[in-house]
Amino acid sequence: MSQHHQADDNFEGGEEHGEESSQRDPSVQDASSPKEEREAKLPSRAAVVHQHLRLEGQKELSRDSMALLWSAIAAGISMSFSMVARGVMHAHLPETDIGFLVECIGYTVGFIAVILARQQLFTENTVTAVLPVMSHPTLPNVGALGRLWGVVLVGNLLGAALSSFTFLHMPMFDEATHQAFIALGEHMMANTPMEMFSKGILAGWMIATLVWLIPAADQAKVWIIIIVTYVMAIGEFTHIIVGTSEALYLVFDGHISWYDAVVGFALPTLAGNVIGGTFIFALISHAQIRGDVEAQRDCKQGLFYRRKR
């Protein structure tokens, strides 16, 4: 095993540092759970979160494609709850600043449902599934990531399309709510492709931040989801799955063409979400952990510890 991979193994909770810890303080080993012992070996609290997400990502990368697809379709349907909740509130609230701030609460519903149900959401996988590949960027791992992304994205879009078609053609909502769905979609489509892309970067970053915060949120998990996604709503940042529900509602109702939905919304928003979630947040977050790993590998310590010695 190379020295580099040796460091990774120690960073992920290997045996070498565990033996040193148990020799230094055997009572800690007796009192601590195996999880606590593994976390104690990590160089920082950020490394604990990184390891948690990386292990989650490894599980997702190894899942069966059909299981991923069905979970992704369910997530696409669940994400349409954001459009439904916001549309229903929009139809019953005055068109004022206060009304806008209140209706944006509805945007958070889909994210709460998807994340708590642990369904496969594409923008969530731009962080969790990427971290194992960054840790070991081999060709098989990159291929597994591509398979996961492709299956989950297709499933999410299918679920969103199914929801939009159903909402439009079945007598579920009154005319006021129907007009509210159209108004939400038209407002989103008023953005230029460059605006879709730019706002998508920030949305991708925010979802990645949400994913990073959840392992440490404990009982406050729902509040973290609400706060982050509420800011996305009032900031009108574009999200590929929520926006697909709104854009396809317009397509199925004849308000915009497929070209407008794909070229004007989907492609620039997808690119922005991936860049914001993966190439910015995940890379930067992984880079800080790699620094800890390198320091651990080289047996480096901070100035405080050197002075203490």
Image (tube, rainbow, N blue to C red):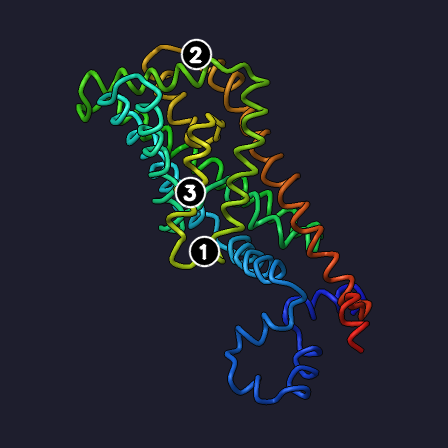
The residue that appears at 43% across and 28% down in the rendered structure is 234
> Whole-percent x and y of residue 54?
58, 57
Q: Residue 217 got which mark?
A: 1
- Amino acid carrying label 1: it is Ala
Q: Is residue 264 above or below residue 33?
A: above
- Residue identified by numbered label 2: 257
Quadrant of res 256: top left
Q: Nearer the viewer, residue 117 or 27?
A: 27
CA–CA distance in space, label 3 to label 2: 25 Å
Q: Residues within 10 Å of mark 1 (few under 14, many from 20)?
A: some
Q: Nearer the viewer, residue 229 or 261?
A: 229
Image-based side of 167 in relation to 6, left or right: left
> Whole-percent x and y of residue 249?
34, 20
> Whole-percent x and y of residue 203?
52, 33
* Upstream in sequence: badge 3 or badge 1: 3
* Upstream in sequence: badge 2 or badge 1: 1
Q: Residues within 10 Å of mark 2 (few under 14, many from 20)?
A: some
Q: Residues within 10 Å of mark 3 (few under 14, many from 20)?
A: many
What is the quadrant of the N terminus in the image? Answer: bottom right
> Whole-percent x and y of residue 264?
52, 16
- Residue identified by numbered label 3: 72
**Does the CB distance between marks 3 and 1 fall below 8 Å?**
no
Q: Nearer the viewer, residue 93 or 14?
A: 93
Q: Which marked residue is nearer to the observer: mark 3 or mark 1? A: 1
The residue that appears at 37% across and 49% down in the rendered structure is 222
Q: Is residue 23 above or below residue 196?
A: below
SS for dot 3: helix
- Amino acid carrying label 3: it is Ala
Quadrant of res 185: top left
